[in-house]
Amino acid sequence: MRPLYLDTAATTPIRKEVLDEMISSLNDFGNSEARYYSFSENAKKNIQVARERIATALGCNSDEVIFTSGATEANNLFIKGYAEANPHKKKIIISKIEHSSVRETCYYLKKYGYNVVEIPVDSSGLINMDILKKEINEQTLFVSIIAVNNEIGTIQNLKEIDAVCYENNVPFHSDATQAIGKIDIKLNEYKALNFLTFSSHKIYGPKGIGALIVKKANGIKVDLAPLFHGGEQEEGYRAGTLSNELIVGFGKATELITNCIQRNNDILANLEKTLLQKLKNKFGDYIKVNNAFSNRVYGLINLQFIGQNNMILLKQMSPIVAASTGSACSISKPSNVLAAIGLNSKEISYSIRLSLSIFNTPDDLKIIDNL
Ligand code: PMP
């Protein structure tokens, strides 16, 4: 019996339509940047198709899609790149529940004199808007707030944050890695949200590819220092030969997942209901859901097995269910996200995250009865 994989918030399997396009593009020989020969025509064309698919999905232009190796790199590129290009402003505003690739990158900048303000959240993970309004000022370099949290699924009110940033003339970046395919984000409906991060392997695409959307200001390129030097690719923001097969897969995955947001959410909502019911039947009061609030995405449950150490529990469960404690990127530390919504260290040590796939079926969940 194969264990049931319930860790899609960490990474998803590649869906078949994506794999098919990737396999055929592996044969697209030639450097996509080459100008004077025709070998690379296919690679070039297919990269442009992928760019356009992503641009359509997100309501931006195709030349605003900057391919990176994933969300970690995209977050680093924005945070360090924007800081370096705008050295006169030293105040950074993030939330208390950012992914480590935003939080740690901002902390890294502290040694260069940056003041990092972390806006607290309520028990459902929503940022305190009054504190944001109080903190934001002309010294603020940018505001970066995670669109959907990776441990508890909280959906932030992006439009409200956007309005505050716009009023204060401060650029807004969001890590939307867990949001794409679950909530609809069209950048042309925003005024300050000019930078957006996301990643392919969270949306049934391949690993090793993601993007930073860098919106142009009235057609003019924004200043952003590159992390890598020595190449003019990606508008000069990201040097290095593009991986056409990964980009093709990423483009297809983005198109497919964003075309069916309502359907995906219906599937996940149903599966989640069944999963929770099964767990309640089996464990009764020994389980407690940490994210039993409505402002969150479906298919991501964070819960405590009261009295059970989460690491030991996950190991014991592993022949039946493959899950994790939360963020795989900062596994050695207790969850700062659960602490931010008010859990104590004991409660955090009992907590695990179960995240479903749109390809799971109610039949798959029967395995839970064996726990
Ligand atoms: N941001 C969020 C919200 C994530 O969930 C993750 C993946 N754990 C990342 C960033 C990093 O993504 P990647 O693996 O593509 O670098």
Image (cartoon, helix red, strand yellow):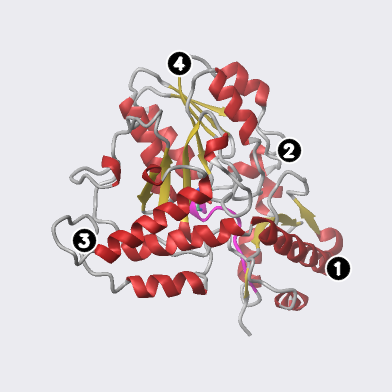
Which residue is drawn at the image coordinates 50% and 62% (left, top)?
Answer: 253
* First in residue order: circle 2 vs circle 3: 3
Instruction: Please rate how many residues cluster around mark 4, counting C-alpha atoms within 10 Å: few if below 14, some from 14 to 19, many from 20.
Output: few
Q: Is label 4 in a helix, a strand or a loop?
A: loop
Res. 299 in view: no
Residue 261: mark: none
As drawn, 91 above or below 126: above
Which part of the image, by quadrant, shows the N terminus? bottom right
Instruction: Please rate how many residues cluster around mark 3, counting C-alpha atoms within 10 Å: few if below 14, some from 14 to 19, many from 20.
Output: some
Beta carbon at label 4 within 8 Å of ligand 1:
no
Looking at the rendered image, the disc whose residue lies closer to the viewer, 2 or 3, is 3
Instruction: Please rate how many residues cluster around mark 2, counting C-alpha atoms within 10 Å: few if below 14, some from 14 to 19, many from 20.
Output: some
Report the residue marked by disc 4.
Answer: 139
Q: Which residues are magenta?
A: 321-332
Q: CA distance from mark 2 to mark 4?
A: 29 Å
Please say whether residue 327 is one of the residues in the magenta stretch: yes
Image position of 104 (left or right of 188): left
Report the residue marked by disc 3.
Answer: 31
Report the residue marked by disc 1.
Answer: 281
Please say whether residue 69 is one of the residues in the magenta stretch: no
Which residue is drawn at the image coordinates 64% and 38% (left, top)?
Answer: 156
Q: Answer whether labels 2 and 4 touch (C-beta < 8 Å).
A: no
Tell me the kind of residue under disc 2: Ser
Q: CA distance from mark 1 to mark 4?
A: 53 Å
Q: Is label 1 in a helix, a strand or a loop?
A: helix
The answer to which of 179 and 189 lies nearer the viewer is: 189
Tell me the kind of residue under disc 1: Asn
Beta carbon at label 2 within 8 Å of ligand 1:
no
Residue 325 placed where, x, y %?
61, 57
Residue 123: mark: 2
The answer to which of 155 and 48 lies nearer the viewer is: 48
